[in-house]
């Protein structure tokens, strides 16, 4: 019994130690899982906040761009209005200054004439002249006031124009354009003077210039087509270089021939395959989480069963210890009673040998009575001990409890092993999911950040067509060079006749002093500005 008790104590201690270690391991696993779940939720929340901030900033920037464009249009309109007003004011001021100067000269002439004739004229004539002089002086004052007012308005307009930086830049551009226009006009005048010699040469020159312009336009169009074809070819190369390593993977499901012949369809198929793989991984992850939760519930149940079994085992051990103590006490009592019975039997045997002694007989009777009472008490104690021994758990029950504890320990070990396998599988799935999330965050196939634009035209076909058109471009270049050589010959042949026509140079230039000339200049400058702004 003592050996069994010691074995049970050692087994219970080992079992408790193992249970504590397993509880610690389970707590660590739970903490790790909670930490992983919290990190995943934090990353998702950060991703959502970043996407929301990006969309909000994008909308704000678009609104700001629209507002700035509207403000820029308003400023340009105001600048054009101010410019027109300034040009009108300058033209009016020039006219008024000229008129005032003419009137002042006339008045001065009249005054001089009046002073010359004052010596010979009469007093009446002097009065008339004085009145005329006063009228003329008042008119001169009014005109001077008008001129001062126009000058003040002109100064205000000039100050507003000087304060605006954009207007200064436009004025500089206008001066540059005017200088270029003058150069072009000078060249045009030279050409017109050279072409006035004969109408035939002029018609030929006009035809050659038209052909030259057409050939230059064709040349520019062909160059633009070549540049667009080269850009398309470079884009196709970049597209192929970018998607070639992705297509070479085993799980891509797309061949290199499909990528060359059908790039848009191949990219869509690759996107669908990656999306399906991502969805499958996400489903695996959800299934693994469900299995993990189930195993956690099973572990909790097993832990509760282990706790209950441990409590029952402790109760049984306490009962067994109490019963063993009672058994030891009863065994001691039995041995003591047996010793007492043996001593009494020996005493009885000694007393039975002296029947003559009455006192001894009385004492023996008393002792026999005492011994009988003690024997009855010992029998009652033995019966109580037997009843308690019967009420104790049998060794078979103890073995049953031990077998159940072993089975529970095996089930717990299997559950832990399965939990470890599922944890490894979950970590692997999380690693693959992290790889896919990195690719998506990098912008490979993220729907929120990237936009798949399908190629409207096959770039290889466009390249072949551009190569086919290169021969036409060379022909146009040769034609252009021939026309230029003819034009240079014609201009060199008529250089001798150009001095005779130099007198008509001044007639070809337009005068910008008038209002109509200034309006024409303003329209031309607007057209040039639009033409300059178009390529930007």
Image: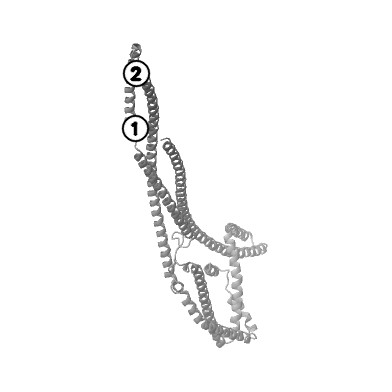
Q: Is residue 100 visible?
A: yes
Q: Residue at x 53, y 77 (%)?
A: 223
Closest to the observer, 388 or 463: 388
Question: What distance separates the C-alpha of mark 1 from that of mark 2?
Answer: 39 Å
Residue 56 % position (x, y): 46, 54
Q: Is residue 96 visible?
A: no
Identify the element where label 2 is drawn. Answer: helix
Residue 495 bears which disc, if any? none
Decide: is 287 above or below 7: below
Residue 75 % position (x, y): 52, 59
Mark 1 crowd level (few <14, some 14–19, many ≥20, 10 Å Cα)? some
Decide: is 236 above or below 348: below
- Which quadrant holds the N terminus? top left
Residue 389 bears which disc, if any? 1
Q: Residue at x 37, y 37 (%)?
A: 312
Can you tell which of label 1 and label 2 is closer to the viewer? Answer: 2
The residue at the far top in this view is 359
Q: Is residue 205 left or right of residue 427?
A: right
Identify the residue position indicated by label 2 in the image: 352
Closest to the observer, 106 or 57: 57
Q: Is residue 476 left or right of residue 415?
A: right
Q: Mark 1 vs mark 2: which is more N-terminal?
A: 2
Closest to the observer, 453 or 514: 453
Residue 531 % position (x, y): 53, 70
Residue 174 % position (x, y): 58, 67
Identify the element where label 1 is drawn. Answer: helix
């Amino acid at each position: 019994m003592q050996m069994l008790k010691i074995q049970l104590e050692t087994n219970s201690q080992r079992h408790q130690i193992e249970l504590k270690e397993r509880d610690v391991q389970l707590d660590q696993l739970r903490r790790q899982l909670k930490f992983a779940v919290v990190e995943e939720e934090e990353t998702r929340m950060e991703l959502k906040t970043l996407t929301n901030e990006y969309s909000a900033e994008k909308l704000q920037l678009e609104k700001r761009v629209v507002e700035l464009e509207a403000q820029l249009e308003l400023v340009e309109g105001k600048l054009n209005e101010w410019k027109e007003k300034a040009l009108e004011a300058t033209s009016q001021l020039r006219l008024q200054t000229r008129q005032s100067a003419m009137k002042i000269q006339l008045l001065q002439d009249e005054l001089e004439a009046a002073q010359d004739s004052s010596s010979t004229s009469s007093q009446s004539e002097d009065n008339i002249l004085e009145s005329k002089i006063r009228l003329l002086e008042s008119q001169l004052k009014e005109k001077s006031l008008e001129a001062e007012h126009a000058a003040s308005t002109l100064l205000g307009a000039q100050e507003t124009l000087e304060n605006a930086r954009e207007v200064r830049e436009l004025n500089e551009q206008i001066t540059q354009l005017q200088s270029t226009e003058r150069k072009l006009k000078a060249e045009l005048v030279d050409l017109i003077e050279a072409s006035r010699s004969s109408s035939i040469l002029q018609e030929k020159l006009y035809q050659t210039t038209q052909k030259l312009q057409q050939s230059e336009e064709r040349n520019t169009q062909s160059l633009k087509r070549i540049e667009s074809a080269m850009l398309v070819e470079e884009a196709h190369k970049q597209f192929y270089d970018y998607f070639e390593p992705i297509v070479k993977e085993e799980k891509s499901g797309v061949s290199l021939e499909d990528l060359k012949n059908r790039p848009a369809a191949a990219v869509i198929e690759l996107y669908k395959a990656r999306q399906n793989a991502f969805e499958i991984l996400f489903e695996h992850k959800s299934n693994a989480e469900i299995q993990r939760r189930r195993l956690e519930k099973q572990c909790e149940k097993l832990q509760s069963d282990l706790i209950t079994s441990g409590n029952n085992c402790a109760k049984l051990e306490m009962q067994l210890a109490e019963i063993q103590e009672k058994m030891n006490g009863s065994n001691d009592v039995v041995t003591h009673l047996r010793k007492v019975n043996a001593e009494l039997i020996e005493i009885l045997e000694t007393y039975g040998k002296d029947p003559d002694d009455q006192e001894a007989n009385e004492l023996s009777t008393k002792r026999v009575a005492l011994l009988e009472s003690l024997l009855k008490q010992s029998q009652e104690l033995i019966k109580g001990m037997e009843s308690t021994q019967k009420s104790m758990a049998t060794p078979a029950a103890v073995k049953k409890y031990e077998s159940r504890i072993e089975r529970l320990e095996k089930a717990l070990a299997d559950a832990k092993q399965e939990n470890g396998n599922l944890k490894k599988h979950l970590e692997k799935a999380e690693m693959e999911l992290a790889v896919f999330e990195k690719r998506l965050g990098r912008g490979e196939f993220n729907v929120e950040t990237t936009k798949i634009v399908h190629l409207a035209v096959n770039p290889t076909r466009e390249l072949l067509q551009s190569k086919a058109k290169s021969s036409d471009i060379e022909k146009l270049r040769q034609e252009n060079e021939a026309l230029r050589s003819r034009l240079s010959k014609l201009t060199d042949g008529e250089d001798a006749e150009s001095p005779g026509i130099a007198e008509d140079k001044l007639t070809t230039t337009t005068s910008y002093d008038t209002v109509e000339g200034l309006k024409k200049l303003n329209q031309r400058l607007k057209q040039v500005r639009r033409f300059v702004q178009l390529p930007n």
